[in-house]
Structure formats: C-alpha cells, structure tokens
Amino acid sequence: MHPLAPVCDDHSRVLVLGTMPSPASRAVNFYYGNPRNRFWRVLAALWDEPVPEANEGRRALCLAHRIALWDVLASCDIVGASDASIEEPVPNDLSLVLDSAPIETIFCTGSTAARLYRQLIEPVLGRSCVALPSTSPANARMRLSDLVSAYAPLRDACR
C-alpha cells in the first residue's frame, strides 16, 4: 500500500509521478528518499539551487516551482524497490491532485511509471504523460548532467 500523501498545493502546475515509494522512501516518509537517487540533485540543478537534504526543504523546492509529487500506483506486489517485479498494480486516483490544482502537464519518472500510467490511468483520464528517465541509481548509464538535460521540459512546464 502506498503510504505517502501527495505533495501539492493550489499553485501546482505540473504533476511528477513515480511508480511506488521504495523501502528507503518509506523509511524517511518522503519521495525519492534513497540517498543515491538523483531526483533532488536534478531538481536543484534545474533551478540552480542547493540540494535539499530534509523533507521540508524538498517539499518547499517542489511547491516553490509549482511541482506536485505523487506516484502512479496506490498498491502493488513488489520486491524491494524493483519496478521489474511489480505485480497486481492498482492505480492511484489522481483526482485527489487534479481536482485541487491546475495541473497542466503530467510527467512520469522512469519507463515503468510511464508504462503503468499509460496502461492504467490515461484511458480513464484521457490525459497523456511525458516520460522522463529514471533518476534511480539503477539507471547508472545516465550521468547527472544527462538527467538534468532530460528534465529540462519539466523546468519549462513550470514557468
């Protein structure tokens, strides 16, 4: 079961969806909690800001740039943090965010999040997503600078 509430306010313009919180994220009670995950370094680099180390700084960074965070799945069977092991996926009801914020663009971090969004949510919502590469340490083929470049559309959508 997904344990984290969405990060969002009535100024959020983009929604960034991962797949499901990892054990490390659940342990720190916030998104992208694995210290080796590069998500927070990428966001900080997009706006030339310091990398937030604590949950409140991470929440503030998102909200300052009109970003809402959540995940595609409400529940699933998963082994550790391995998206490849996901079975029995149940989608989140994105209306919780979409009814409270003027979201213009939806981004998915990683190919599994994008695939599950397109399979489980897009047919219901009728809204497509933009797939971004995973910032997970498992995506070692991409350097931090490559990820920052790949995430430029996210920054542009927040303007």
Image (cartoon, grey):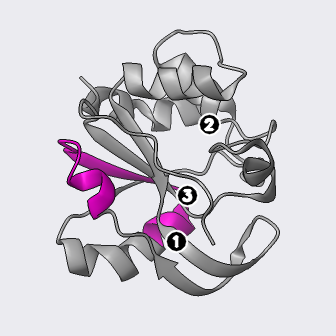
Tell me if residue 83 comes above or below residue 37 in the rendering.
Answer: below
Disc number placed over residue 39 in the picture, else none: 2
Measure the alpha-carbon separation of dots 1 and 3. Answer: 17 Å
Q: Residues within 10 Å of mark 2 (few under 14, many from 20)?
A: many
Residue that appears at 33% across and 63% down: 94
Secondary structure category for the residue under label 2: helix
The quarter of the rendered structure image containing the N terminus is: bottom right
- Identify the mark at residue 126; answer none if there is no mark: none
Q: Assign the C terminus to one quadrant of the image.
A: top left
Residue type at tag 1: Ala
Residue 110 shows in the view: yes
- Residue 74 circle label: 1
Q: Which residues are magenta?
A: 95-115
**Quarter assignment of residue 156:** top left
Report the residue at 65% width, 29% height from top.
55
10 Å crowding of disc 1: few (<14), some (14-19), many (20+): some
Q: Secondary structure at mark 1?
A: strand
Q: Identify the mark nearer the N-term, 1 or 3.
A: 1
Taking the magenta stretch, the answer to whether it contains residue 103 is yes
| Amino acid type of the residue tagged 3 in the rendering | Gly
